[in-house]
Amino acid sequence: MADLVFWKRKTLAQMNQSEWESLCDGCGKCCLQKLADEDDGTVYYTNVVCQYMADDCSCTQYQDRHELVPNCVWLKPEDVENFFWLPSTCAYRLLSEGQDLPAWHPLVSGDPERIHAVNISVQHMTLIADNSIPEDQWQDHIIDNQ
């Protein structure tokens, strides 16, 4: 058991901060603006992205993101039952659903660029910064569900 990687021997709640943070694959899909259908709860992704996302799908204001963007996503182990809105490729969602990490995940592949090479990240998409388009127009930018 001790030779198993941490995500196979620990629950999300048992992980330390470093382990938890390392689960993020850097896809950038969390930073896409999402719209929820008020009737059935379906979550729709848009190609509208947080203004602080860099070309490499990282956050340019990671340490201050919650002050700058009050509704910025902050994933926590205690919120695991609400991870349904995360993309189907997200490590947090996969592990919360009892699945394993995919081969392209940086913790498995050892290559943080692999996610971009296999087009799992938003790096290949045409994105629009959220501060350049009125929120009432976001519905015009819905993309295929993730």
Image (spheres, helix red, strand yellow):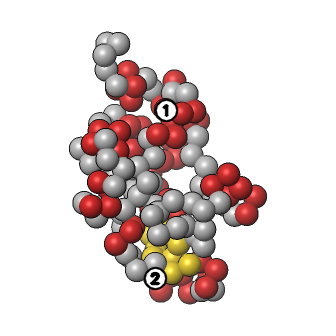
Q: Quadrant of residue 100 in the image?
A: top left
Q: Measured along the vertical axis of the image, is residue 3 above or below residue 142?
A: above
Q: Which mark is residue 141?
A: 2
Q: Secondary structure at mark 1?
A: helix
Q: CA distance from mark 1 to mark 2?
A: 34 Å
The foreground one among 33 and 3 is: 3
Which tag, 1 or 2, sits closer to the chain's start?
1
Q: Position of residue 109 (x, y in %)?
A: 27, 42
Choose mark 1 or mark 2, whichever is in front: 1
> Quadrant of the image for the C terminus?
bottom left
Q: Position of residue 104 (x, y in %)?
A: 27, 48
Q: Position of residue 24 (x, y in %)?
A: 45, 46
In the image, 102: left or right of 57? left
Residue lying at the far top of the rendered structure: 1
Whether residue 39 is visible = no
Disc 1: which residue: 19
Q: Amino acid at mark 2?
A: His
Q: Amino acid at mark 1?
A: Glu
Q: Residues within 10 Å of mark 2 (few under 14, many from 20)?
A: some
Q: Residue at x 47, y 86 (%)?
A: 140
In the image, 54: left or right of 5? right
Q: Residue at x 54, y 33 (%)?
A: 18
Q: Residue at x 39, y 67 (%)?
A: 122
In the image, 11: left or right of 65? left
Q: Residue at x 73, y 63 (%)?
A: 68
Q: Residues within 10 Å of mark 1 (few under 14, many from 20)?
A: some
Whether residue 125 is visible = yes
> Quadrant of the image for the N terminus?
top left
Q: Measured along the vertical axis of the image, is residue 66 above or below residue 129?
A: above
